[in-house]
């Protein structure tokens, strides 16, 4: 199961980093950080939900991998 999780995260690394850059870094550079709590809630959601979804998806993949 660890190998499946590692594969899932390796496969999602580049898209996930791109998503983080667009969803967090760009708004931060445009001044969204000054909005306070709403932006902080957005950042928490953006940072926590994708890894949880990757874990759930990784648990559903059969041992032999996707066919």
Image (cartoon, rainbow, N blue to C red):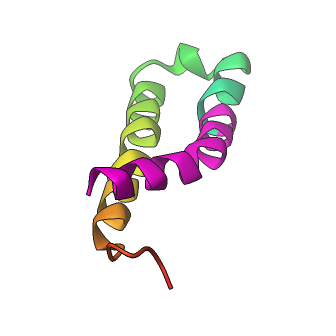
Q: Is residue 17 above or below residue 29?
A: below
Question: Can residue 8 be found in the magenta stretch?
Answer: yes
Quadrant position of residue 40: top left
Q: Residue at x 46, y 31 (%)?
A: 43
Where is residue 23? Give x, y as percent: 62, 38
Q: Is residue 21 above or below residue 64?
A: above
Residue bounds of the magenta highlight: 1-22
Q: Residue at x 33, y 77 (%)?
A: 62
Where is residue 38? Give x, y as percent: 43, 30
On screen, residue 62 versus residue 11, left or right, reads left
Question: Can residue 9 be found in the magenta stretch?
Answer: yes
Where is residue 26? Give x, y as percent: 71, 28
Q: Nearer the viewer, residue 19 or 7?
A: 7
Q: Residue at x 39, y 23 (%)?
A: 37
Q: Residue at x 36, y 40 (%)?
A: 48
Quarter containing the N terminus: bottom left
Quadrant position of residue 47: top left
Quadrant position of residue 31: top right
Outermost residue to the bottom: 67
On screen, residue 56 versus residue 24, left or right, reads left
């Amino acid at each position: 199961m660890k190998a499946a999780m590692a594969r899932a995260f390796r496969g999602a690394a580049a898209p996930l980093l791109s998503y983080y850059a667009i969803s967090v870094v760009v708004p931060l550079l445009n001044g969204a950080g000054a909005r306070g709590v709403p932006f902080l809630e957005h950042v928490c959601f953006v940072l926590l939900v994708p890894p949880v979804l990757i874990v759930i998806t990784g648990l559903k993949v059969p041992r032999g991998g996707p066919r």
